[in-house]
């Protein structure tokens, strides 16, 4: 790459990073992020991780704890931390892509991953970039390096085990690597392929065994196994609540992927692409990762697969350019068409999203709400926020008297097994504030009220609440709050 090209690329990266910062800041904390922030802060304040039901792997909460230990807990600095993850994801893509496919493919892949970050909810604090980075490091261990083959295979498995500690979706990367070795490495004997898979499994097993030993030594193994393994793999319910995002907000990506697939199927490109083991590896990892969409179609679930498939899209376009036009730049209309497609996708999903680039959002109202809630429940008091959930816990700096901070799929599952949790919480003498609106039953899990079990549970809870608590009349608080009678 020439010096002017390097300067142009660096300036473009700085501009994109600044745009991502503004977009992230104006997006607010986000739903999932508030859970990580609440539990991360609780760990800083002496809680054990087993005190809470977890929606992600333990490493996500430990990482959040480390972030909160280093920065002020406000929108500005949390946005800085999210932007740093974005930079690491894009830079990691370029680094691995350059070593695997060359500078041109690396640059285009990095641009695609940057675009994915805007569209796939990575403007919020999410585990997808750490998971993706561990997948990249696994590919790096497999494809380049001086250690022995067995060591590289075990190291790749270890990286995927670390990714699993952030989110169970890393297991799909492992499945993709297994599929690659078993079905796409025809130059190896069956024995060599099986041996490779065993070394990778060994590394992965070591990566998950070490934290399991820690949790066993601290009496938290049962909690760890249930929420890190059993629930996400066996009990997380499939849904289609976010299906529309696939054909609106993410339309641009799937059109690009489909177009790249059509190009790759042509005679000249097919031989050039699919004879390359590196392309086969990223295709397996990216393609298998998209199986998570069978569970839910939230945009961030697409990212682990989309990021790896970006290498395939970029390599396909660069090979097509070489075959059709020689070693020249891509035609000028191609990036313009991609940009128009992205704008159209964003417009289809939510035209209001463009406002996030035009002004800096004012969050002063959050501070006023936090001050009012903190005046009602001092540090050490327990609270129970059933509909404001994670966001209100985070603002108030208080912790629930139950082991969950929201009403999503994990608490729904827990309340089937322990239906007395909510009513018993009202008997806690430290409980000083409850947020619940019996007239507006809206929960994070849209299927919460589909069960008669849960409807009866809420009926009993509402009766007990009205017996022991009185509704707080405060027009300055847009929440339905209850305080103990006689307080």
Image (spheres, rainbow, N blue to C red):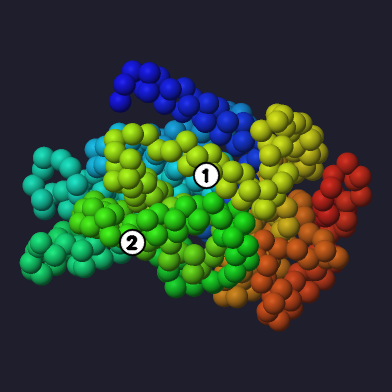
CA–CA distance in space, label 2 to label 1: 21 Å
Q: Is residue 3 or residue 44 the one in the foreground?
A: 3
Judge from the rendering whether residue 53 lies leftward or rightward of residue 179; answer left or right: right
Which numbered circle lies on residue 265? 2
Q: Which residue is mark 1?
A: 338
Asked where in the image residue 88 lies, by quadrant, the reply is top left
Query: Would residue 95 be found to the left or right of residue 479 on screen?
Result: left
Q: Is residue 355 visible?
A: yes
Residue at horizontal 30%, vertical 25%?
Answer: 1
Res 251 → quadrant:
bottom right
Q: Which residue is at a point 33% across and 40% down the rendered structure image? A: 325
Residue in front for this viewpoint, 413 or 330: 330
- Element carrying mark 2: loop
Nearest the camera: 372 or 128?
128
Q: Quadrant of residue 185?
A: bottom left
**Is residue 398 something one can see in this rendering?**
no
Q: Residue at x 57, y 60 (%)?
A: 246
């Amino acid at each position: 790459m020439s010096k002017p090209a390097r300067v142009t690329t660096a300036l473009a990266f700085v501009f994109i990073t600044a745009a991502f910062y503004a977009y992230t800041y104006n997006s607010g904390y986000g739903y999932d992020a508030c859970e990580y922030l609440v539990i991360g802060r609780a760990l800083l304040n002496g809680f054990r991780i087993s005190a809470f039901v977890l929606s992600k792997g333990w490493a996500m909460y430990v990482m959040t704890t480390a972030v909160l230990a280093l920065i002020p807990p406000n929108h500005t600095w949390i946005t800085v931390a999210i932007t740093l993850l974005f930079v690491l994801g894009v830079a990691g893509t370029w680094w691995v892509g350059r070593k695997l496919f060359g500078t041109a493919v690396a640059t285009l892949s990095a641009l695609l991953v940057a675009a994915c970050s805007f569209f796939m909810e990575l403007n919020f604090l999410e585990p997808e970039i750490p998971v993706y980075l561990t997948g990249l490091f696994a590919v790096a261990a497999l494809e380049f390096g001086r250690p022995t083959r067995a060591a590289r295979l075990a190291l790749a498995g270890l990286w995927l085990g670390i990714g699993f500690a952030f989110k169970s979706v890393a297991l799909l990367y492992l499945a993709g690597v297994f599929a690659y070795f078993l079905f796409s490495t025809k130059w190896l004997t069956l024995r060599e392929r099986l041996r490779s898979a065993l070394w990778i499994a060994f590394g992965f097993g070591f990566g998950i065994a070490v934290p399991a030993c820690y949790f066993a030594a601290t009496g938290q193994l049962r909690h760890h196994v249930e929420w890190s393994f059993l629930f996400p793999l066996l009990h997380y319910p499939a849904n289609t609540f976010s299906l529309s995002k696939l054909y609106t907000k993410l339309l641009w990506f799937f059109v690009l992927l489909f177009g790249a697939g059509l190009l790759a199927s042509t005679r000249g490109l097919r031989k050039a692409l699919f004879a390359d083991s590196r392309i086969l590896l990223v295709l397996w990892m990216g393609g298998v990762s998209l199986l998570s969409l069978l569970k839910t179609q939230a945009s961030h679930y697409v990212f682990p697969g989309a990021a790896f498939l970006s290498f395939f899209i970029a390599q396909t376009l660069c090979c097509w350019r070489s075959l059709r036009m020689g070693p020249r730049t891509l035609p000028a209309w191609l990036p313009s068409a991609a940009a128009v497609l992205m704008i159209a996708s964003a417009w289809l999903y939510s035209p209001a999203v463009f406002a996030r680039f035009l002004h800096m959002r004012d969050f002063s109202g959050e501070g006023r709400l936090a001050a009012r809630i903190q005046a009602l429940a001092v540090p050490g008091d327990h609270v129970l926020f059933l509909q404001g959930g994670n966001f209100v816990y985070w603002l108030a700096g208080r912790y629930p008297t139950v082991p969950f901070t929201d009403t999503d799929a994990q608490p729904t599952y827990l309340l089937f097994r322990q239906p007395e949790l909510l009513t018993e919480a009202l008997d806690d003498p430290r409980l000083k504030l409850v947020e619940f609106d019996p007239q507006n039953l809206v929960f994070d899990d849209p299927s919460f009220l589909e069960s008669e079990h849960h409807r009866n549970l809420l009926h009993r809870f509402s009766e007990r609440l009205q017996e022991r608590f009185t509704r707080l009349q405060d027009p300055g608080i847009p929440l339905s709050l209850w305080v103990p009678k006689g307080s």
